[in-house]
Image (cartoon, rainbow, N blue to C red):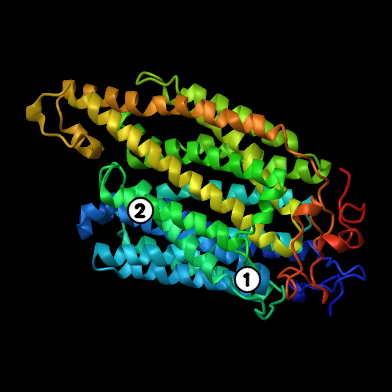
Amino acid sequence: MFSRKTSSAAIATAPAPESSGDPQYSKRYVITIFLSLAIAMFTASFAETMTATALPTIVGDLGGVELMQWVTTAFIMASTITMLIYGKLGDLMGRKFLIMSALAIYLVGSVICAITPSMEFLIVGRFISGMGGGGLMILSQAIIADVVPARQIGKYLGFIGAVFSVSTVLGPILGGWFVQVPGWRWMFAFNAPLAGIAIICIGIFLKTPMHKLTAPLDVKGIIFMVLAVTGLVLTVSWGGTVYAWDSVQVIGAAVVCVVASVLLVLSERKAAEPILPLYMFKDRNFNIVTISGLLIMAGQMGTVTYLPTYFQIVNGLSPELAGLMSVPRVIGLMITSVSTGFIASKTGKYKWMTIACGVVVTISFFLMSLVTVHTTLFVIGLYLFIMGFGNGLGQQIYVLIVQNEFSHAIVGTATAGNNFFRQIGSTLGSSFVGTFFTARLTADISSKLPASSHLDIANITPEELGHLTKPVREVIVNGYCDALIPVFLIFVPIIAVTIVLCCFIKEHPLATTINHGAANPRCEAPLSSGPSAGDHSSSPPATSSTASTTGMGSPSVRGQG
């Protein structure tokens, strides 16, 4: 056992719990753990943005352009599937070994991508990377909840948002550099030392306990979840692109998704330790922030993903400069994600942030819908700054609300559930926009170009555009703008729904201890067969019958803000 005051030689040693059974960690220890987690999260996010930038070059070197979509689909599918598994296992057996394993798996996938001789092996490497990447964000957010009470989590979650923001800016820039100078294979090799550093730091500094897995694993739930996610991803990835929406393949994948989802719900009702506990959906706040996160991510990922190509086609920017156009949005997100975290920690108030998030993001989407081919980059940058500013107001606060709603015994499961549905929103949004955009672009431009042009409108590149005559270029530029920009207006009423939803959030006091009970007694985790991952005492997690004695709702556990 160690005292709360740590020497410089024992910077990462966790002090002993106080008599109350709730651990108290030194600020130095918490910051050390946070920096270690930041390296892990930065590694995955940074690598993904680099990959997106280099993908056209990679496909050009390896061939197999018909498999290009699977490079992204494989990662999305694997990361979505593993999110809930990491969340539940972290609650049952501890998170230190899991996050180190996730980093190691991600590292193996990156090495395979670096030495791949073909597109097929690249896709395998991306799938393995996704299996590791799916746990990094979930486990990092849950580990922070293991060492910091909800009342203080906000400021750390805000910095997590800032870490991802920085990576989205540096990724495209360095991705372009790797492609042009040492080669794209070094881009994947670059991930290895970053992941290695993160593994070493977490292995040395993180001192959370491990538990033997005594509860039965929800195998049926995992199988049905895997089938449901696979069916969904294949449906939205194939539909309208690889196969027609009414094709046997797409309809079959959709049927698998629906049937597996129904079986998942039925299975979770009987499972001893469900990977997606149905009692979480009894909580109003969880439902509100999960739906809000899904809708906003659908709009964000569906539209913003296409903006770099838009800037290259319409504004004639290079890939590097097009990537830098994301800087205004990132700056706005950094300002509010960090500041709102500190404000929530200081005041204990957070409901207004979620409402403001919906309002500002809705306004930004409306402003983006007014963009034309003549709109200056400065004005577009201003609109994107407003979008990022609004996004930062709520995205990390959603996680804070979820972690505060449920007992610490299921903090990983609850965090994974919220992120799982956000990922679903991103997948659906990207699919909808891709289908709508491609169909509108093809229909609009094809009718204005001579049949002799023989252009593949949906896959035209900025390089090809530069070799066309001026009249043809103008048709394509105007068509590109007319196809993408109206999508922002479609999402305005969809995102506006989050404003109404967040008005019904019940602002429960933020817990001031780590091992706290549920804010809503109806949503208290049932008594498990062993201690939770974050439980640093020998006692099992509190049940609804003991919530009052563990401090749920009492001043010692939930501050009044």
Cα distance, mark 2 to mark 1?
A: 40 Å
Q: Position of residue 519 (x, y in %)?
A: 80, 51
Q: Which mark is residue 157?
A: none
What's the residue type where badge 1 is placed?
Ile
Q: Position of residue 325 (x, y in %)?
A: 44, 35
The answer to whether residue 30 is visible is: no
Q: Residues within 10 Å of mark 2 (few under 14, many from 20)?
A: many
Residue drawn at x 46%, y 65% as measured from the top left: 131
Quarter containing the N terminus: bottom right
What's the residue type where badge 2 is placed?
Ala
Position of residue 235 relative to residue 336, above or below, is below
Residue drawn at x 72%, y 73% as measured from the top left: 208
Q: Going by the image, does 225 lie left or right of 172?
A: right
Decide which of 58, 287 is in the foreground and name it.
287
Q: Position of residue 503 (x, y in %)?
A: 71, 31
Q: Which quadrant of the figure has residue 207?
A: bottom right
The answer to whether residue 459 is visible is: yes
Circle count: 2
Q: Going by the image, does 65 lie left or right of 308?
A: left
Residue drawn at x 15%, y 33% as measured from the top left: 467
Element type where label 1 sits in the image:
helix
Q: Position of residue 55 (x, y in %)?
A: 31, 52
Decide which of 233, 356 is in the foreground and name it.
233
Which residue has dot 1 on it? 202
Circles 2 and 1: CB atoms closer than 8 Å: no
Q: Going by the image, does 110 lie left or right of 66?
A: right
Q: Which quadrant of the figure has residue 178?
A: bottom left
Which residue has dot 2 on it? 253
Q: Mark 2 or mark 1, which has the lower sequence index?
A: 1
